[in-house]
């Protein structure tokens, strides 16, 4: 659902610019970037499923506190 929100915005831009990408017919000719794109799509699918399940099971209050902890932890790791 989250990723489908971008389709109405990206679809017309792809048509206007003539730039698009689709999986080739031969898997061996796809290259590392194509496989990386597929891998990232699968990872994000699992991530968002786990994210929504966490919110459903624990509630929005727990998740909002988790966001504060994740932000501080990310800043610490960056430093």
Image (tube, rainbow, N blue to C red):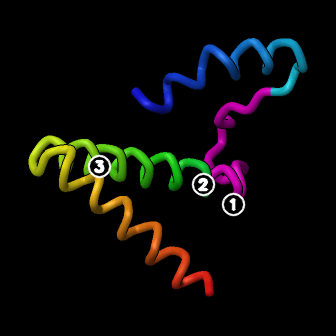
Provide the secondary structure element on which disc 1 rests. helix
Q: Is residue 49 above or below residue 63?
A: above
Gap in angstroms between the C-alphas marked 3 and 1: 28 Å
Can you tell which mark lies on residue 51? 3
Q: Which residue is mark 1?
A: 32
Which one is in front, 63 or 48?
A: 63
Residue at 75%, 12% (x, y): give it: 12
Q: Residue furthest left?
A: 57
Provide the secondary structure element on which disc 3 rests. helix
Residue at 85%, 26% (x, y): give it: 19
Can you tell which mark lies on residue 63? none
Q: Look at the numbered discs 3 and 2 and tell me whether their residues touch, using CB distance below 8 Å.
A: no
* Residue 79 screen position, x and y as percent: 62, 87
Which one is in front, 16 or 31?
A: 16
In the image, the segment drawn in magenta is 20-35
Can you tell which mark lies on residue 35? 2
Q: Is residue 4 above or below residue 60?
A: above
Which one is in front, 22 or 50?
A: 50
Provide the secondary structure element on which disc 2 rests. helix
Q: Earlier in the sequence, mark 3 or mark 1?
A: 1
Q: Earlier in the sequence, mark 3 or mark 2?
A: 2
Q: Look at the numbered discs 1 and 2 and tell me whether their residues touch, using CB distance below 8 Å.
A: yes
């Amino acid at each position: 659902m989250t990723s489908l929100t971008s389709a109405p915005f990206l679809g017309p831009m792809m048509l206007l610019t003539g730039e698009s990408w689709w999986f080739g017919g031969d898997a061996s000719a796809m290259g590392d970037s194509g496989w990386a794109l597929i891998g990232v799509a699968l990872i994000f699918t699992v991530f968002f499923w786990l994210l929504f399940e966490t919110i459903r099971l624990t509630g929005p209050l727990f998740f909002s506190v988790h966001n504060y902890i994740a932000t501080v932890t990310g800043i610490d790791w960056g430093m």
